[in-house]
Amino acid sequence: MSERSVSKRSQEKRWYTVLAPEQFDRAEIGETPADEPEKVLDRTIETTLGDVTDDGGENNIKLTFRVTDVGSDAAYTELIKQELTRDYNRSLVRRGSSKVKAILTVRTADDYRVQVQPVAFTTKVADRSQKEAIRRTMLDLVEEAAAERTFEGLLDSIVQGRLSSAIYNEAKTIYPLRRVEVEKTTLEAHPEEVHAEEEAAADVDE
């Protein structure tokens, strides 16, 4: 292929400004090139909460956005994953203490299916029954939070630390805790996908 044709192809590409969802005030999170708008759809952008909010103190949370709509020069996204950075996650582990983790899939009030992974760190080593009680508390509070909130509301509660605080305040009565975090949150299915699965299951049952 000649340099001329390569240059022509690159010139035909347009750069799209990638915007965070409305819950993050449509903050700019990057740029992506494409020769056709359709090719921008479903692309993912990884960044930190600190970059989105312009707060360096929040760089311990990594966010992944997926493009869902494309305008003339902008690409609009939805948040599909939140997770702690590897370095921050590693820094939370201490000798002589226990790490209590739970993984569960919940359904929000507006029928999104989401996997949530809360984790608690105790001040000293907890016994088996104490760890199980802490895990049960985490499961109950995450399920309750999802049932009461929309997908956006649940993500806000997680990203802003309100769900972690609620778990901490409840679980610390079981055993002294040093920290509670939501290690990872992943969007598994949209409402239309959840409803389609339910209809398919109902047809099979019949």
Image (cartoon, rainbow, N blue to C red):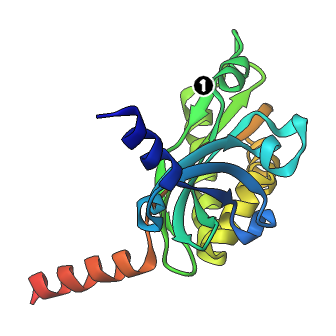
The residue pinned by badge 1 equals 127
The answer to which of 47 and 175 lies nearer the viewer is 47
Q: What is the x, y in percent for residue 21?
A: 69, 66
Q: Residue at x 71, y 40 (%)?
A: 181
Left or right: 54 as drawn, with respect to 79: right
User: Does residue 117 appear anywhere in the picture?
Assistant: no
Q: Is residue 79 above or below residue 161?
A: below
Q: Quadrant of the C terminus?
A: bottom left
Q: Quadrant of the N terminus?
A: top left
Q: What is the x, y in percent for residue 64?
A: 58, 48
User: Does residue 107 appear anywhere in the picture?
Assistant: yes
Q: What is the x, y in percent for residue 172?
A: 79, 41
Give the amino acid type for the residue marked by disc 1 in the picture: Asp
Left or right: 23 as drawn, with respect to 32: right
Task: Single out the residue that lies furthest toward the bottom.
Answer: 206
Q: Is residue 15 above or below residue 76?
A: above
Q: Quadrant of residue 177?
A: top right
The answer to which of 26 and 204 lies nearer the viewer is 26
Q: Is residue 157 above or below residue 136?
A: below
The answer to which of 67 and 164 lies nearer the viewer is 67
Q: Residue at x 44, y 72 (%)?
A: 190
Left or right: 122 as drawn, with respect to 186: right
Q: Residue at x 66, y 70 (%)?
A: 152
